[in-house]
Image (cartoon, helix red, strand yellow):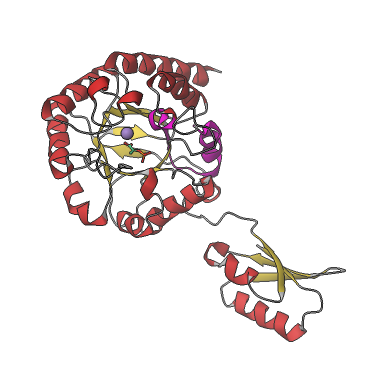
Amino acid sequence: MVVSIRKGTDEAQIQNLVEWLKSLNLEIHRSEGEYDTVLGLVGDTSHVDIDLISGLTIVSNVMRISEPYKSANRKFHPDDTVIDINGFKIGGGNFQFIAGPCSVESPEQICSIARDIKSAGANLLRGGAFKPRTSPYAFQGMRAEGLELLEKAKAETGAPIVTEIMDLSHLPLFENVDVIQVGARNMQNFELLKELGKTDKPILLKRGLAATMEELLMSAEYIMAGGNSKVMLCERGIRTFEHYTRNTMDISAIALLKEKTHLPIIADPSHAAGISRMVRPLALAAVAAGADGLMIEVHNDPAHALCDGPQALRPEEFAKIVKEANAIREIMTKF
Ligand code: PEP
Ligand code: MN
C-alpha cells in the first residue's frame, strides 16, 4: 500500500502516522519527492482500513498494491485447491457436473431427475428447498420437506446434494447436505458467511447480481477466515443494461478468477441467460474458459416447473452438453 502525504504537512503529524502504521506490524519506507512525501507500507496490509487512512486530512492519496484477500489469493497458495465431495473431486484438473431442478417439487420429480442426471454423467444433484423468489406470492420452495426429499434422492442414486441456505437459523437442517449453496442474493450476508466459516461443509458461493470479482473473493475470504477453506466460487451472470437475457454471463470472470484464486470455479449458465437454448453455448464457452465445473438446471417437465422453467433443460439436452463439454476438456488437455 502506498500513502501520499499532502505537501506542507507538519513533520510531527507525519511521524504520528508512521508510528501508528508501525504499530500495525508494518514496515514503512519513506521517500521524499519534489511535491509529496510518500510512505510505502510493507507487510500484511489486509487488516488496514484504506478508507480510514484516505480520510485523514494529511493524506492526499492511498493506493492498494496487493489484494485485500489473503486466504483466497493464489499468490500465497499457488496450487489449485481440490475439494472432495464424498469421493467426487473438484478443482486441480478435476471437473464436476452439478445438475437438477431449480426447486424440489415432489418425491417423484426429484428422484426421477436425480436418476436422469446421474445417467447423463453428472455426479452431484442440485435442487432448491428454500427459494429466494422476487415475489412473495411465488412458490417459496418445499423448505424442510424439500431437504428430506433431496436426502431420499441421494439415498437412491448416491448423488451428493447441493442446496441453498437462505437464513442462518436453518443451518441445523443442513446437517445431511453435502454442499451448501450461498445464493447470489446472500453473497454479502456476512453473518451467514461467518457462520458457514465455522462449519466443515463445502460451500458453493454464487456471485452477487452486481458484485465485482474482488467483492466475490472478499466474501470467500469471510468463509475462509473462519477456518473453512472448502469454498467454490460460482459465476452465474451479472446484471447489466442488457435485457435480452436475464443476466450477462461474465466469461472473463472465469478466466480471471482462475488467475486470482486457487479456489475451484463453477459456471452456472442457466441463471446467466435465463433461456434454455442459451445454456448450451454458454456452458461450452465456460468450459473453454477454464471452469472446474458446470451447474445446470434440468427438469423432466420444464413447461410445468414451479420455478425457472424457461431456463431448464430436459435430461436428454443436458446429456448432450455433458458429452460436448467433456470433448472440449479433452481437446484442451491435448495441446
Ligand atoms: C439457484 O441456483 O436456484 C439460484 C436461485 O441461483 P442465484 O442465487 O444465482 O440466483
Ligand atoms: Mn433457479
x and y percent of residue 219 in the render?
43, 52
Q: Is residue 81 above or below residue 167?
A: above
x and y percent of residue 326 in the render?
41, 18
Most distant residue in the bottom direction: 12
Is residue 266 one of those drawn in magenta?
Answer: yes
Ligand 1 image position (quadrant): top left
Q: Is residue 249 above or below residue 214?
A: above
At a point 40% along the width and 54% down the height, the residue shown is 224
At a point 46% along the width and 39% down the height, the residue shown is 80
Most distant residue in the right direction: 34
At a point 26% along the width and 29% down the height, the residue shown is 101
The boundaries of the magenta stretch are 249-272
Relative to 308, 66 lies left or right: right
Quadrant the N terminus occupies: bottom right
x and y percent of residue 300 in the render?
23, 20
Q: Nearer the viewer, residue 114 or 236?
A: 236
Q: Is residue 49 above or below residue 294?
A: below
Quadrant the C terminus occupies: top right
x and y percent of residue 113 in the render?
21, 23
Is residue 256 one of those drawn in magenta?
Answer: yes
